Amino acid sequence: MHYVACLFMSKAARHKAILDLIDEGPVESQDLLQHRLQRKGFEVGQATLSRDIHELKLVKGAEGYRRAGESVGAEAVLPSVMHLARQFVVEVRQAQNLLVVKTTVGSAQPIAAALDASHWPEVVGTLAGDDTVLVIASDQKKALALARRIREAS
């Protein structure tokens, strides 16, 4: 029983440290968050940190992680796809009517959200992981045009 209480306290302390770091300023990636936690004495693996982020309901925006429901001035509006592509897109590959957009680690979700919000007629929908966005176009010709558009920005 005492062991479980120690684990709970450790988790609670880690959660508080995460929220304190988020409140101090932008934390752009899980790697950076993990590094800052280590400097505060918390050794945490990537899987545990991902669970913590989920449990704390943190969301990742253009500036980095923040508490859900919190908007910071211009962050309420997504940056343009072109702006994000210039900063974070590494590679664009086409497969029929699909595009696989490789990004820097942790950047796929903001890019997918910006693509969805752009209402570009070529984009039917997106699916994002950590560093990859799957973009679905209505046909192969539109996928080619979209790939060209994204490549020009990056």
Image (tube, rainbow, N blue to C red):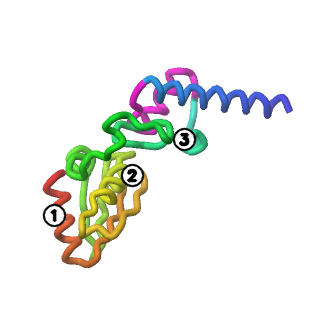
Q: Amino acid at mark 1?
A: Arg
Category of crowding for the residue at label 1, using alpha-carbon neighbours closer than 10 angstroms: few (below 14), some (14–19), many (at least 20): few
Category of crowding for the residue at label 3, using alpha-carbon neighbours closer than 10 angstroms: few (below 14), some (14–19), many (at least 20): many
Q: Quadrant of the N terminus?
A: top right
In the picture as drawn, the residue positioned furthest to the top comes out as 40
Residue 28 shown in magenta: yes
Q: Amino acid at mark 2?
A: Gln
At horizontal 20% and vertical 64% (from top left) the residue drawn is 147
In the picture as drawn, the residue positioned furthest to the right comes out as 1
Mark 2 and mark 1: Cα distance apart in space: 20 Å
**Residue 23 badge:** none
At horizontal 35% and vertical 59% (from top left) the residue drawn is 133
In the image, the segment drawn in magenta is 25-42
Q: Which residue is mark 1?
A: 148
**Secondary structure beneath label 2:** helix
Which of the 4 image quarters holds residue 122? bottom left
At horizontal 35% and vertical 37% (from top left) the residue drawn is 63
Classify residue 102 as left or right of residue 12: left
